[in-house]
Image (tube, coloured by chain):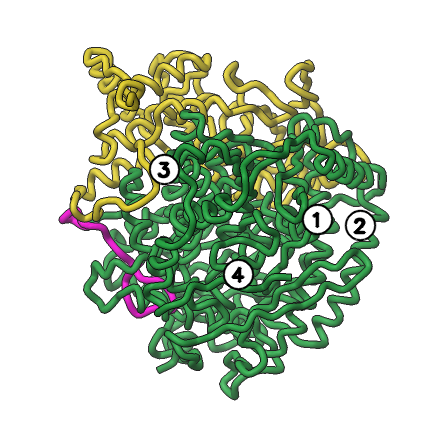
Amino acid sequence: MKLHLRIWRQDDSQSKGHFGEYDLENVREDMSFLEMLDVLNEQLIDSGQEPVAFDSDCREGVCGMCSLVINGKAHGPLAGTTTCQLYMRHYKDGDVITIEPWRSEAFPVIRDLIVDRTAFDRIMQAGGFVTLHSGPKPEPNSIPIEPEVAEQSLDAATCIGCGACVAACPNGSAMLYTAAKISHLGLLPQGQPERYSRVKQMVEQMDKEGFGSCRNYAECEAQCPKEISINFVSQMNRDYLKATLLEPVDRRSKMNAQ
Amino acid sequence: MDFDAKIPDGPIEDKWTGHLESIRLVGPRNRPRYKIIVVGSGLSGGAAAASLGAMGYKVHCFCFQDSPRRAHSIAAQGGINAAKNYRNDGDSVFRLFTDTQKGGDYRAREANVYRLAECSTGIIDQAVAQGVPFAREYGGMLANRSFGGVLVQRTFYCRGETGQQLLLGANSSLAEQIRNGGVQMHTRSEMMDLVVVDGRARGIVYRDLITGQIRSESADAVVLATGGYCNVYYLSTNAKGCNVTAIWRAYKRGAAMANPNFVQIHPTCIPASGDHQSKLTLMSESLRNDGRIWVPKNQSDQRPPSEIPEEDRYYYLEERYPRFGNLVPRDVAARNAKDVCDSGMGVGPTGYGVYLDFRDAIHDQGKKVVNAKYANLFEMYERITADDPRKTPMRIYPAPHYTMGGLWVDYNLMTTIPGLFAVGEANFSDHGANRLGASSLMQCLADGYFVLPSTIGDYLSRHPSGEIGADDQHFKDVEGEVKDGLSKLMSIRGNRSASSLHRELGKLMIDYCGISRNKQGLEKALSKIPQMKEEFWAHLSVPGSDDQVNQALEHAGRLSDFYDFANLMCRDALHRDESCGCHFREEHQTPEGEALRNDDDFANVSAWQYRGEDHEAELYQEPLKFEAAPLAQRNYKT
């Protein structure tokens, strides 16, 4: 098939961007969307032009590196599918496809379709862990976990941190990502000791990063490639409310005092 | 050159504990004075950086991705082995050890493999404590599944995303250390070279992939956790960014490379569909628990697979290997798939595919049960091929997946350069000539959580901390060399993309140094690689500049190292004049077509030492001893 591509080009975070227009022929339906872009890039490189910069790595839908807003949808038109797992059989000859980077203030463009998502990592670093050292730990079967609870926790933990929720949200909110990370640990017995300090610290960091607030548009859930449920957001809100009432005190420095 | 593996004395079951009790320690007050660089943030690197940071060392961790969570360990699907014996089915540390040795066709170091089996149970404990949501049984106990090459159920799993969950566990510990200042994380930073001062590894030179700046970081020790080199084949199950550059540059600085030809070709991947193919997708081996592998008996059978009756199907693994059936080790399954396809029985448009059929499993267990086990794998397959494996069998074919070869390390995981350590897939590791399923996660985490954090202290304690900074002349010299290398790539200004050149190298390697090899083919590859390298240096096109994001430059740099590496792989495969595990030399097979080892001449590790651009690499051999698990012919038939 033959396609017309409108692709966002931007030299770096400081420059002004624009749409580049490209015609691409001989696109096969068993190509993935990124392979279609690879073909375009090879043609550009062979003729000495600068290829379109975009992020991707595992191309199996799990590393969360790939992104792209395709015709206005994060990761394209298919539900529960990352861009790398989107195949050209869902397009037809003569289609015009507009390809943009994630659009959010908290995710500045680095080049073309690549954005800076380090804000997500800083949210994790604020409290997305169980404090521990490496070494001997209790026998895991000494703390039985209902399979339903383990599965729910995994439903949240399956988040790949791609940022589609932010790109999909009219407000650029990162509530779904943060809620998934909080719920993963908050549901498990191992996550209980730090449950309320965790939610407080992570939500505060999320706010600091400049993400927008949640207005229940639910676009995040609709465009999440892992179909993470927004029920986790209510779970996070409940925990956060409780945390503000409890006001957990970070006693680390006191505990470390000699 | 020192090839002493430094294996501790004593009976095999006491070696590791005895070693731990006798090695030197660095005290908690001194640890912050020692700086350690960890390159790579996957399971081995992430776990090592987090563990070392928690101990109090000053750690700098590097990855080329935008977040440590994206390292390719994340894509591991099926599970992780541990000798917990929860199923009461005869499992033990010793059994896991012998299974791994046998699976690896006796080309690994006994002491290392035993230690790996010993550490396996602690990994599960550690991961559960981090909040890894492993599958549970109804009573709340941990669930298990089985994997190829063993007769017990010892594999722990999180649906089909065990790698992601274990990596999130390691990454959460890493995040804790980054918050506490124990670890400084450098994302979108690619190691370009190793800096060796007075014979010791003292730091790295890296490229900031956003600004293109060449920078240095000095340290008291360097740990490479940079994964495997399957992308030498262009098409593999590895992520697009996986490359050999870090370990190759270390090799050129004096670290020996061990068994580079040992590459695992995974039997269950989705076949390639055309030239545009950018990677191959693995379908977890766990599918072989319930899927039956077959091809039509009649080569010209044009019926859809679901309409082919039982008597016209050739369940070749079940017939050839009645005891293990569809669960034979990966190398055996891969070779048999190639064999039936070479004889014209393959399916699909290219004729290089076999069926993996769930019909009987769905009939026996019900759609719901089968679906619950493999839903995400079925969906992934359907997204890529538009076929529903619940209705029609999957088509699969082997693809390069994991590299058992890598930097030579001693028992302490130190390479031949003092102060340079290698962990995870980057070292030549514990899997011999073939890795069993669900063992890579185990080895990465054993190295990262338990082995390296102890053994690196013994090295550090023998050297004063500090003394050298990144402004030292040695660093400036290496930075200069790196910059020259990049300008050379930029200045060719030819008309061929790195991808098109890489595809040619990959095709050559899979044809002549892939599932099976022979002398003639390897010699042919060795004569062609220099021509391809010449073509690369004459016609490469890298548009743009080197002071900004330039993915074409990144790819070209990685590919330039793959040419020399491919050459060494073929030389290694040619030298190893025997068949063992993944390394199937057609000249050496049993009358039944199985790998025929030559233990008299090749019960050893081949370690190659760089001798300069104009000289052939020099070969050293580390003899392997088999005392606890005596040598035996691999037999998965009876």
Residue A7 visible here = no
Between the residue at mark 4 and the residue at mark 3, the CA separation in whole angstroms equals: 29 Å
Cα distance in 3D space between marks 3 and 2: 41 Å
Which quadrant holds residue A14? top right
Q: Earlier in the sequence, mark 4 or mark 1?
A: 4
Q: Is residue B96 above or below residue B484?
A: below
Residue A237, position as x, y percentages in the image: 26, 17
Within 10 Å of disc 3 (Cα), the crowding (few <14, some 14-19, many 20+) is: many
Viewer-nearest residue: B634 or B274: B634
In percent of width and height, residue A91 lies at: 56, 37
Instruction: Please indicate whether residue B179 sits to the left or right of residue B364 in the image.
Output: right
Q: Colour of chain B?
A: green
Shade of chain A as shown in the rendered figure: yellow
Provide the chain ID for the residue under circle 4: B
Quarter of the image containing the N terminus of chain B? Answer: bottom right
What chain does mark 3 sit on? A
Mark-to-mark CA distance, 2 and 4: 28 Å
Q: Secondary structure at mark 2?
A: helix
In the rendered image, which quarter contains the C terminus of chain B? bottom left
Packing grade of label 2 (10 A; few <14, some 14-19, many >=20) is: many
Q: Name the residue beneath numbered marker 2.
A: B536
Q: Earlier in the sequence, mark 2 or mark 4?
A: 4
* SS for dot 1: helix
Q: Are marks 3 and 2 in contact (CB under 8 Å)?
A: no
The answer to whether the residues at label 4 and label 1 have Cβ atoms under 8 Å apart is no
Mark 4 residue crowding within 10 angstroms, few (<14) / some (14–19) / many (20+): many
Please say if the residues under marks 2 and 1 sit with CB atoms less than 8 Å apart: yes
Residue type marked 2: Phe
